[in-house]
Amino acid sequence: MDLETEDLSFLPLGGTGEIGMNLNLYRCDGKWLAVDCGIGFGGAAHPEVDVMMPDPSFIAGRRDQLLGLVITHAHEDHIGAVAWLWPQLRCPVYATPFAAAVLRRKLGEVGLANQVKVHVVPPGGEINLKPFAIRLIRMTHSIPEAQALAIDTPYGTVLHTGDWKLDPTPLIGPPSDEAALAELGRKKVLAMICDSTNAMVEGHSGSENDVRDVLTGLIRELRGRVAVTCFASNVARMESIARAASAAGRSTAMVGRSLRNIDAAARECGYLKGLPPFLREDDIDDLPDDNVVILITGSQGEPRSALARVAMDTHPRVALGEGDTVIFSSRVIPGNERAIGTVQDNLVRRGVDVITDTHHAVHVSGHPARDELRRLYRLVKPRFAVPVHGEWRHMSAHAELAEEEGARPILMEDGDILNLAPGTVEIVDSVPVGRLVLDENRLIPMTGEVMNARRRLLYNGVVVASLAMDRSGNILGYPKLTAPGLFDADDPDATRVVEDFRDGIADLPEATRRDDDALTEAARGALRRAINRRLKKRPQVDVHLLRI
């Protein structure tokens, strides 16, 4: 496909065929628009990775044609990569006040606060980036100010939903603007790029107001310390927990940096006005156990989170024990089951009661179930449906529902180029896509040599041999082997590997044993063969040669 022709096309670089790492591109008449720029987490599928993000190389190479980056909302999988990838994009950023407040804190942490131009757009506002005319439409989600984007172009209108649900009582912010969506439908929508997360879930996602009622009744009946963990970005849930605590005569303390950052951004934007400031973790021990609720990070079992440390009794200021309760007011993100189970096991071992959404209705999703998807299709009436923000099973279920509602579904994956106009709406080409891994303060390719080496280390280990030789090429004593994670110091296999390795060195030609470079390389090969013979593994190996 000629990417410089006059047309309208959609190209996801991340977030399609997967949940997380959202980075979407629209091209119209040679100009590009980016929507969202988020991170993902390694989880069980990639234990060698903490944080990863889409590789923006394709659009970075065209950044002179990139008009801007629009953020639909402030969740990490939509905003978390901006601070790391913006130096490659160098474009203006557009966000609502709350998303902008969250983003400024992230930019400040990496020293970009004064470099990135963040344009603040009111919810329901407009952005004019010719040939794109963008209207923001208020949507309900599990974070304030989620916006759908109605993108008008000379070729037609595309609705990019972002993350959303239909909740008549969202508690923080207004309900989804169904009137604006219906008006859009009357004017005809070419295509809808839509959230698929809960497309396999029948019924309705539920209301945040119902969760508040359940938490209020539940906390009123509990004794001892009560800790509640939820997604840090769910401001409505934070407010519900605080109000439930107050109704039970308890004060609310906040534990965890991500919660404090969201709390600060929310109050900066006028949310949580009716709540007194949350107590800090230093204040908890000053209160009777029956008079405190602890709002704490760690709902997904993150090993370094505050709740994980409390469960292991290693947190410096917060402790829970016999007679206390932890409420998991959150869902389990796929891949985190084992980590969450470990935290819950550790809590129960300490005598703590654990309550989850399997016991009480303490959580509702921020994404639409099938009844809400049907309602949206009947309002918007798009000609074409493009499921995104989901794995293939979610997108496939979404496609079937869209077809039932009269839209023609198109399934695609990261890197596919979907021609929307003129002519046939179809996938016409693809571009290279990849992932970058955040390694402290640098980005490295997911499939590069550094990460490949880490994967080999993770699954096969590393073995280092120290070898002493005289100038004539004779071995002095026995080599010393270090192999953490492969065998113990007194393991007989270790002795056998050393003997095989020593025999392999002794069998080398005399000329090789006298040449340091040749000997080192040959010794690595001998070490690999010795380990494979005894352990049937192929670890990373290295040899330290000492010539005496």
Image (tube, helix red, strand yellow):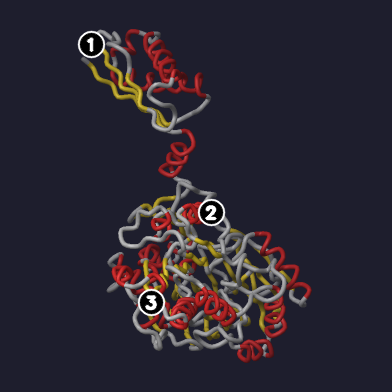
Tag count in the figure?
3
- Amino acid type at image mark 3: Asp
Taking depth in this image into account, of 153 and 137 the one nearest to the observer is 137
The reply to whether the C-beta atoms of the residues labelled 3 and 2 are less than 8 Å apart is no
- Amino acid type at image mark 2: Gly
Q: Which residue is mark 2?
A: 341
Please indicate, yes or no, whether residue 385 appears anywhere in the rendered image: yes
Q: Measured along the vertical axis of the image, is residue 179 above or below residue 290?
A: below
Q: Looking at the rendering, in which quadrant would you find the N terminus?
A: bottom right
Q: Residue 471: which numbered mark, if any?
A: 1
Residue at the image point whose x is 48% and y is 65% from the top: 325
- Amino acid type at image mark 1: Arg
Q: As drawn, is 355 to the left or to the right of 121?
A: right
Residue at the image point whose x is 41% and y is 61% from the top: 320
Q: Position of residue 243 (x, y in %)?
A: 46, 82
Instruction: State the separation of the CA atoms marked 1 and 3.
Output: 68 Å
